[in-house]
Amino acid sequence: MIKNPEIINLPKIGGHDQGYISLIQANDLLPFNPKRIYWIYGVSKETERGGHYHHKLEQVIICIKGKLTIKLENNKGEIIKFILDSPSKALYIPQRHWRDIFFHENAILLCIASENYDENDYVRSYSEFKNIS
Ligand code: T46
């Protein structure tokens, strides 16, 4: 089972002319039981979102369209950058990572989340995040 941030290569079924199906099944590639799915779209050209940390939430993120650059920082101050530029790739984000998400033009982000929305799970101040590290 995955524990660290990691790109997951998803199945890609189909072909050049008919197109493709990619998928994630709960007991297969998904390292948690999903409770919430949301998607982010209509983000202006070259915009950054995120800028927070979650105590408990785990996520799998897929870039359905376009390209995302995702920068993660863990409690030890280690920073890793990932590029999602294909709907057949997913990024697993464990708990306790600060994230900055850069949306390149017209990107659409799909998130499968382990918990329902809870503002108390967020740390939105970078200095507060560094203090709990
Ligand atoms: C992450 C990226 C990928 C809700 O009311 N319900 C929800 O389920 C969500 C996700 C958000 N909201 C509200 C809370 C805020 O007032 O929508 C507003 C923006 O939410 P947030 O600051 O979480 O948006 P992002 O795009 O910065 O971050 C979200 C996730 O929270 C985050 O964990 O990795 O999407």
Image (cartoon, rainbow, N blue to C red):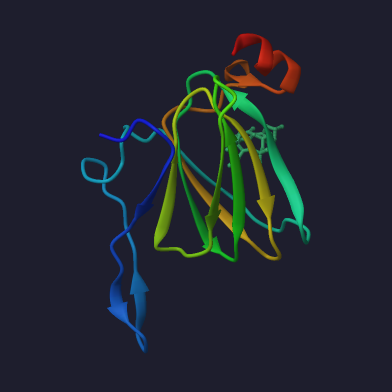
Outermost residue to the bottom: 17
Is residue 127 visible in the rendered structure shown here?
Answer: yes
Residues 79 and 48: in front is 79
Res 32 → quadrant? top left
Q: Which residue is drawn at 76% across and 52% down?
A: 47
Give the farthest residue toward the top: 131
Which residue is at the front of the view, 81 or 68? 81
Q: Where is residue 124 drawn, in percent x and y?
A: 71, 23
Could you tell whether 89 is left or right of 45 in the image? left
Q: Tell which of 32 and 1 is nearer to you.
A: 1
Image side of residue 112 versus residue 69, left or right: left
Residue in the image at 35% along x and 30% along y: 3
| 84 relative position to 46: left or right | left
| Quadrant including the N terminus | top left
Task: Give the answer, above or below, for where 17 lies relative to 26.
Answer: below
Quick check: 91 above or below 118? Answer: below
Residue 125 in sight here:
no
Image quadrant in which you'd find residue 12 = bottom left
